[in-house]
Image (tube, rainbow, N blue to C red):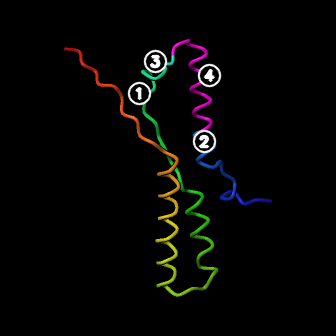
Amino acid sequence: MQNAWQQNIPLSRQVQYFNDTRAKMVAAVGSAAAVDALLARSMFLISVGNNDLTGFAYAEPLLKRSSAQQQSDAAAFLAYLISNYSATITVRTAPSDDHA
């Protein structure tokens, strides 16, 4: 049985779910441009790493390492998370609204 902090959906799968939902929206509306215009004006909350950080924080003291090694491990772990997220998440800017 998994602990609650071990149950997660990988970021790559979450991105795939978003892409699948966008495709369904395009199929329903019939216009990718209309869906993209709506999404460009939407706000998205991306909350990542909570399970990862909780698991790391729980496991680290059990390894009985020195304070310096724990800090090094934490820095390496955070760099890994940032690298993984950077590889998965891209930023697209919305077209400008020129109402002149």
The residue at which mark 1 appears reads as 40
Q: Residue furthest front?
A: 87
Among numbered discs 2 and 3, the one appearing first in the sequence: 2
Among numbered discs 3 and 4, the one appearing first in the sequence: 4
The numbered mark at residue 33 is: 3
Q: Main secondary structure of the magenta part?
A: helix
Image-quadrant location for residue 6? bottom right
Q: Secondary structure at mark 4?
A: helix
Mark 3 closeness class: few <14, some 14–19, many ≥20 residues within 10 Å? few
Residue range in magenta is 16-31
Label 2 and label 4: CA atoms lie apart by: 15 Å
Q: Which residue type carries mark 2? A: Gln
Among numbered discs 1 and 3, the one appearing first in the sequence: 3
Asked if the residue under mark 4 is in contact with the one under mark 1, i.e. CB atoms within 8 Å, the reply is no
Label 1 and label 4: CA atoms lie apart by: 17 Å
The numbered mark at residue 24 is: 4
Is residue 2 depicted above or below 46 in this figure? below
Label 1 and label 3: CA atoms lie apart by: 10 Å
Q: Residue furthest left?
A: 100
Q: Which residue type carries mark 3? A: Ala
**Going 62% across and 22% down the picture, which residue do you hit?**
24
Among numbered discs 1 and 2, the one appearing first in the sequence: 2
The numbered mark at residue 14 is: 2
Q: Nearer the viewer, mark 3 or mark 4?
A: 3
